[in-house]
Every structure is written in C-alpha cells, then in structure tokens.
Image (spheres, helix red, strand yellow):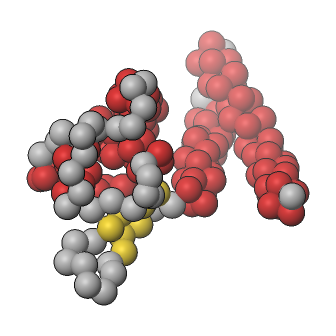
Amino acid sequence: MTEYAQRTDRPAMPEWIEQMAAHFEATEGMPLIAGRILAFLLICDPPERTAAELSHGLNASSGSVSTNVRLLLRLGVISKTTRQGREAALYRVEEHHWPELVRHRMEQVTGLEQLTEDGLRMFSGQGERARRLRTVHEFYKWLSGEMPQLWQRWERERRGALRM
C-alpha cells in the first residue's frame, strides 16, 4: 500500500471533502463516510484506490469503507476493477454515470405528479384540501413537462463539448 504523508495534497482538500460529504448526506441521505469516499475518489490522483488506501486516506475504519463502497457500487457512481498481479480490488468514480444517477432521482421526484393527480380525483370539490393539493400537483406537472427538454439539452451540449 502506498503510504501517504497527508490525507491529501492540497491544504483545503480535507475541508472540501467534508463539505461534499455533508452535501451528499443532506441531499441524498448518504452516510458521511460514503460521501467522503465519493469526494475523495472524484479528486484523487491516481484515480483508482484500494479499500485500504481509502481507509488510510480518509482515516476511516476498513469495515466502514467496505460497507460504504458497496453502497456506492450499488448506486453506480463508483466501479470496482481488479488487475493481474494485484490482490486488492481498485475503486474509481464513474463520472460518466452521474447524469443517469441524477436522471433517476429526478424521475422519482416527478413521479409525484401521478400521486398528486390521484389525490385530486379523491378530493375533487373539497375546497381547501383540493386547493393545496392542486398547487403541489401543478408544480410537479410543470417539472415533469420540463424534464425531457432539460435532458435533451444536456445531451446536445455534452455532444458539442465532446467534439471540442
């Protein structure tokens, strides 16, 4: 295993890793250590790390790293590879899968449109209850309508950036 003099090669990186971890915890419900692993793998050089290197670099227990690496693998944001001559697996961020992760999250959010529509049928003519539900439904209906154009725009812009 490579010995690291510090956790990172830039003084501000530990703070940035913690900020990223806190963000993933708040927005994705991800455990802090999973967010730390993900942030670390986003910026580490070389881009692949063993579980032992992650544990050492993040000052985390090997059990915690192992558990949270499995979570990140299930989410599809990191991958696991092996190399001939190496006993330990290597983990890396799958940055090109990120849009699919976000798309899946957005589809879950916009899926509430159908639920609020069902609720509107149930509470039709119910005054205040129907009004509150209609306000929420209109937002989700708008959001659902915007998502296809948003993703099409992303694909167009991404293809354009790749040509440069």
Say left or right for 87 vs 116: left
Position of residue 82 relative to residue 140, above or below, is below
Q: Residue at x 60, y 60 (%)?
A: 96
Question: x, y (%) of residue 14?
Answer: 35, 29
Say left or right for 95 vs 113: left
Q: Which quarter of the figure is the C terminus placed in?
A: bottom right
Q: Quadrant of residue 36?
A: top left
Return the residue nearer the eye: 64 or 4: 4
Q: Residue at x 39, y 26 (%)?
A: 11
Q: Quadrant of residue 160?
A: bottom right
Return the residue nearer the eye: 6 or 121: 6
Residue 43 in sight from this viewpoint: yes
Question: x, y (%) of residue 111?
Answer: 60, 47
Residue 73 in sight from this viewpoint: no
Q: Which quarter of the figure is the N terminus placed in?
A: bottom left
Q: Residue at x 63, y 18 (%)?
A: 132
| Residue reaching furthest to the bottom | 84
Q: Residue at x 12, y 53 (%)?
A: 63
Question: x, y (%) of residue 107?
Answer: 61, 50
Question: x, y (%) of residue 44?
Answer: 42, 49
Return the residue nearer the eye: 149 or 69: 69
